[in-house]
Image (spheres, rainbow, N blue to C red):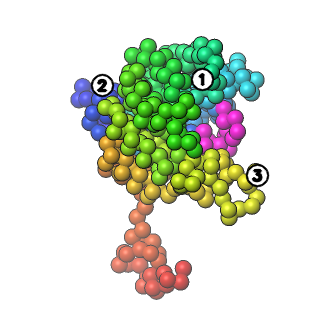
Amino acid sequence: MTSDGNGTKRGLLERLAEGPVICAEGYLFELESRGYLQAGGFVPEVVLEFPEAVMQLHREFVRAGSDVVEALTYYGHREKLRLIGKEDLLEPLNRNALAIAKEAADEAGGEPALLAGNICNTNLFTPDDTKTDAVIRAMFEEQVGWAVEGGADMIIAETFSYTAEALIALDVMKQTGLPTVVTMGLHREHVTRDGHSAAESCKMLEDAGADVVGLNCMRGPATLLPFVKQVRAAVSCHVAALPVPFRTTEAEPTFQSLRDPACNCIPNDRPFPVALDPMTCNRYEIGEFAKEAYDAGVRYLGICCGNAPHHTRQMAEALGRRPPASRFSPDMSKHFAFGTDASLLAENREYTDKL
């Protein structure tokens, strides 16, 4: 990454004008797998209890090629903290998440990474009860306000099932004057929960002033990309695509709908969210997704729940980059059996078919 030549950090839109921007997401799943966060509620108390674990993951994602450090405030809103009886932690949780992310962004080698404030679906929105709109707006306002005070370069609003809720979020975000990214999440139905196609929803967001619109979460590369292409054809602004790294299919299009017939010991026979391992995309599948999405005109790319640094690195490399972590990208030439180096023992190389 480079600056504008004057030592000034380029903003999101400047970077998108020059090429792809990578945003690593997936903090909740990765920190759960590392033993720092509880699946189910997925409340990011980790930013208060184990800030060093959050910082380490930020660093790993940046080192793997992420241009954006997203503050871990997803599900760090008032409703989630109310559910666990810890609303008193709302402000310190958000402020600490932003401070950790800012430190990680500022220490990135070369040009600093962009610091993103983050808001998300509240799970409170219902289309027939407009009284909740004011409650939801207030939740977004407090989180966005802390993001601005924390030095955010941009604001991300993600994983919305209702276009109407996303529009409330966008209206709050636009008041800041910062670049905005808004992504919808499609469940098994091919429309939002308020009945809009992905293309219609994203066009409505563009018309309301969003700088980047698109889709994230829920669907893996195979079942997200067709709808991303529809969005690309419908809007003139930048488009975002951030799938989950799981092998979803037409029959099971979301990671919540995946089943594992090879295992009979999963509670409730539902691999989501902690037994999805056998359905995880390998790094090369992520690389192929990145290339196809880029060729389709998508410039804001990333991976959502289930993402790990090696996925992000592969995405960066598929887009022609060599982030610091590429120093350790696979090189099988020195492997004792599968290698090609002339100094390897011939007896071992000839044994490969029996391994």
Residue ID for mark 3: 267
Does the residue at mark 2 contact the one at mark 3 (Cβ under 8 Å)?
no
Label 3, label 1: how many angstroms apart (C-alpha)?
33 Å
Q: Secondary structure at mark 3?
A: helix
Q: Is residue 345 above or below residue 42?
A: below
Label 2, label 1: how many angstroms apart (C-alpha)?
43 Å
Amino acid type, residue under disc 3 in the picture: Pro
Q: Is residue 57 left or right of residue 20?
A: right
Q: Mark 2: give few (<14), some (14-19) or many (20+) Cα within 10 Å.
A: few
Q: Mark 3: give few (<14), some (14-19) or many (20+) Cα within 10 Å.
A: few
* Residue range (magenta): 28-43
Residue ID for mark 1: 127
Residue ID for mark 2: 8
* Figure quadrant of residue 6: top left
At 53% from the left and 55% from the top, the residue drawn is 249
Q: Secondary structure at mark 2?
A: loop
